[in-house]
Image: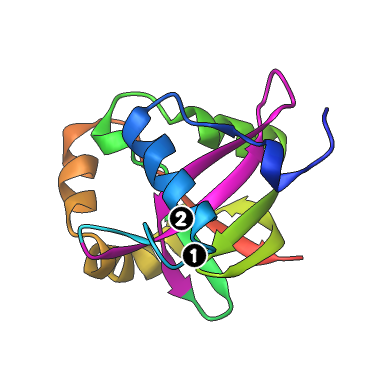
Amino acid sequence: MTDYDPANVKLSPESWVAEQATRYEESNGTEGTDMNGSPCLLLDYQGWRSGEWRRTVLIYAREGENYLIVASKGGAPEHPLWFKSLITNPEVHVRVLGERFPARAEVLTPEEKAEVWSDLLDVYPPYAEYQERTSREIPVVRLSRI
């Protein structure tokens, strides 16, 4: 496992994600903070095999002081790799706008997901279509400040 240094985090191999993450980080959270009008955060997590710190951009919803993210992968049949990494290494770092903080990732139970799903659809309506596209249950993850 490697020590966390936000300046040395590996960016997503998806060029549009890497570009948005770079814009978000370099502007100190004043640019690249939304996706089609939905709010985004930066999630820094440790890879489940390598232990290297990686960064992705995710849409979020608020739940009090916590943040909710959705492991949708656009309705693909498999979970996104970042989700598998959170299961192995739930200690993460989050940037929301100009603030960076350590957090713990926790997968919501089906009952907890049901309570917040409509809030997530308010933030990003395509999640409903993504869930219809796949037979897997799309997980929702709570990020709680440490």
Horizontal arrangement in the rendering, residue 37 relative to residue 72 (left or right)? left
Report the residue marked by disc 1.
29
Residue 43's label in the rendered image is none
Query: In the image, is residue 27 part of the stretch drawn in magenta?
Result: no
**Vertical order, 83 against 67 (above or below):** above
Name the residue nearer the viewer: 39 or 114: 39
Q: Main secondary structure of the magenta part?
A: strand
Q: How far is disc 1 from disc 2 in space, using C-alphas?
A: 5 Å
Looking at the image, the residue that sits furthest to the top is 49
Asked if the residue under mark 2 is in contact with the one under mark 1, i.e. CB atoms within 8 Å, the reply is yes
Residue under pointer 2: 24
Q: Amino acid at mark 1?
A: Gly
Residue 17 visible at all: yes
SS under mark 1: loop
* Residue at x 46% of width, y 46% of height: 21
Which quadrant of the rendered structure holds the N terminus?
Answer: top right
